[in-house]
Image: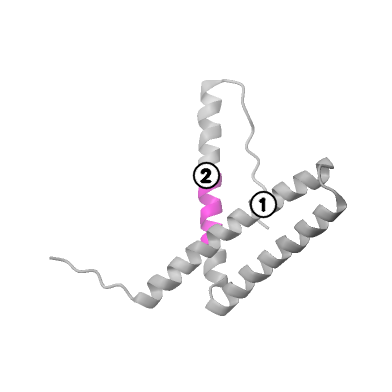
Amino acid sequence: MTTIDIDEDEAATGLITLVVTVVEILFDALEREAVRRMESGRLADEEIERLGRQLQAIETEVESLKASEGIEESVSDLRDDLDGLVWDALEGLDEDHSRSKKPGYTVFRGEHE
């Protein structure tokens, strides 16, 4: 029987890195939605202020967690890897779509902030 040795500290750090990366991705989606709503005029000034404070508080906590766990670079690397996978998948869908010659969409690859 083969055994796999897992360093508990490395496993814990890897899990924290993954969770924080997912939280960052969700945060970016929330931020884009907030901007979309602000630009549409659907939010009152008080709501915009409150939303801005809440988003800033979340961002501060995430940055603090990354610093205290020493995972800033790991999160950045994982984020870049995941972004690349998503864009590759989208480009693959666009290529498949081009071959089918059906009307559709264009994939735009912007720079990661």
Number of on-image labels: 2
Relative image position of residue 52 (x, y in whole percent) = 77, 59
Q: In percent of the image, x 63 and y 56: which residue is there?
A: 27
x 70%, y 47%: residue: 33
Circle 1: element type: helix
Which secondary structure is most common in the magenta stretch? helix
The crowding category of the residue bearing disc 2, from other C-alpha atoms within 10 Å (few below 14, some 14 to 19, many at least 20), is: few
Residue placed under numbered mark 1 in the picture: 30
Percent x, y of residue 113? 68, 58
Task: Please give left or right for residue 58 compared with residue 5 in the image.
Answer: right
Of the pair 74 and 36, the residue shown nearer to us: 36
Whether residue 103 appears in magenta in the rendering, the answer is no
Q: Amino acid at mark 2?
A: Asp
> Quick check: 78 left or right of 105?
left
Q: Nearer the viewer, residue 64 or 3?
A: 64
Q: Which residue is mark 2?
A: 88
Q: Nearer the viewer, mark 1 or mark 2?
A: 1
Residue bounds of the magenta highlight: 78-87
Task: Examine the rendering and report whether any part of residue 16 can be seen.
Answer: yes
Please tell me the numbered disc located at residue 42.
none
Judge whether residue 85 is colored magenta: yes
Of mark 1 and mark 2, the one earlier in the sequence is 1
